[in-house]
Amino acid sequence: MYESGDQAKKGTNQELEILASMTSEERDLLLGRVQPFMKLMMQYRCAIREMETKLQVLNDEFSLQHERNPFESIESRVKEPMSIIEKMRRRGWDLTVDNIEDKLNDVAGVRVICSFVEDIYYLADMLAAQDDLNVLQVKDYIKHPKDNGYRSLHLIIGIPIFLSSEKKYVRVEVQFRTIAMDFWASLDHKLKYKKNVKNPELIAAELKKCADTISSVDLRMQEIRNMMEEGEM
Ligand code: GTP
Ligand code: MG
């Protein structure tokens, strides 16, 4: 969540006051629990940076060869602590740092927004072929969209990070989408939080129709590009 400089400063001051008012035993107990969590989150941030660099390298190379970029933009995030807690609770897992690391695949998330559907598979294949990466899971919601119409390609990838005393594999969820798929997913996400809607079934049916329209536009755009590249247009 983004916050202004002033708000952030106010929050930090409050946190420091709370820490200052604790006994040293209380402080040790808190820091003893918080530090392993902070360390794990740092590792996820490093893994995101590594993954972004790999994608940027592929983008640079591809754009030299083809005079266009396979992706439009990358958005990354480390899952918020409250979302981590909520998901661990929902799945019935004990809230320990080890469990967060072992059970959650999406603490580190990278979203790659591509121009064309074929670019998604190009980038995913190139990543999968890199010998330091482990593709642990593939969910192809483009070939097999969700019932509500959601489309994207999700990969869970193990990526090595090099710490001072160890090489460690960290999992990152990489979501590939076209601009059109991202447009639909963003609006779907916003509508999910709307309360007191009169007819949820109708909204779901309308969203599904929009998803199908968007999918056919993506296909048509791909065809136009292919025809241009083959000199037919
Ligand atoms: P989560 O508990 O949501 O992480 O589900 P999951 O572990 O079964 O993973 P899945 O691959 O199905 O979805 C993971 C992520 O994909 C979500 O956190 C969203 O970012 C995105 N996603 C999945 N389904 C939808 C959807 O119907 N609408 C939107 N807007 N995003 C979705
Ligand atoms: Mg998720």
Image (cartoon, helix red, strand yellow):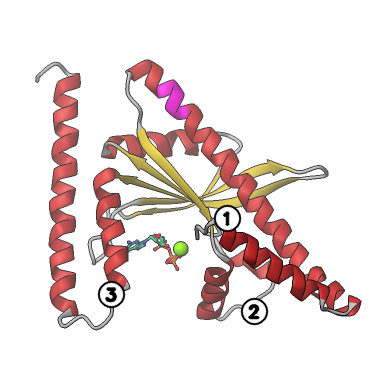
Query: Is 94 colored magenta in this rendering?
Result: no
Up the image or down, 72 lies above or below 82; here it is above
Is any part of residue 95 visible from this angle?
A: yes
Between the C-alphas of marks 1 and 3, the distance is 30 Å
Q: How far across and how far down the image is residue 180, in percent?
A: 24, 47
Residue visible at 57% across and 55% down?
5
The disc at residue 194 is: 3
Query: Which of labels 1 and 2 is toward the front?
Result: 1
- On the picture, is 12 further left or further right than 153? right
How many other residues sit within 10 Å of disc 1, few (<14), some (14-19) or many (≥20)? few
Closer to the N terminus: mark 1 or mark 2?
1
Q: Quadrant of the C terminus?
A: top left
User: Label 2, on which residue?
Assistant: 94
Q: Gap between marks 1 and 2, in whole Å?
A: 35 Å
Mark 2 closeness class: few <14, some 14–19, many ≥20 residues within 10 Å? few
Identify which residue, 206 or 168, lies in the foreground: 206
Q: Position of residue 187 (x, y in %)?
A: 26, 60
Q: Name the residue located 30 percent from the left edge and 51 percent from the top edge.
A: 182
Residue at horizontal 45%, vertical 33%?
Answer: 126
Q: Which residue is mark 1?
A: 5
Q: Upstream in the sequence, badge 1 or badge 3? A: 1
Residue shown at the point (48%, 37%) measured from the top left: 127
Mark 1 within 8 Å of ligand 1, using the beta carbon: no
Nearest to the observer: residue 67 or residue 172: 67
Q: Quadrant of residue 230?
A: top left
Which is more N-terminal, label 3 or label 2? 2
Q: Which x, y percent locates residue 69?
A: 35, 28
Residue extent of the magenta highlight: 58-62
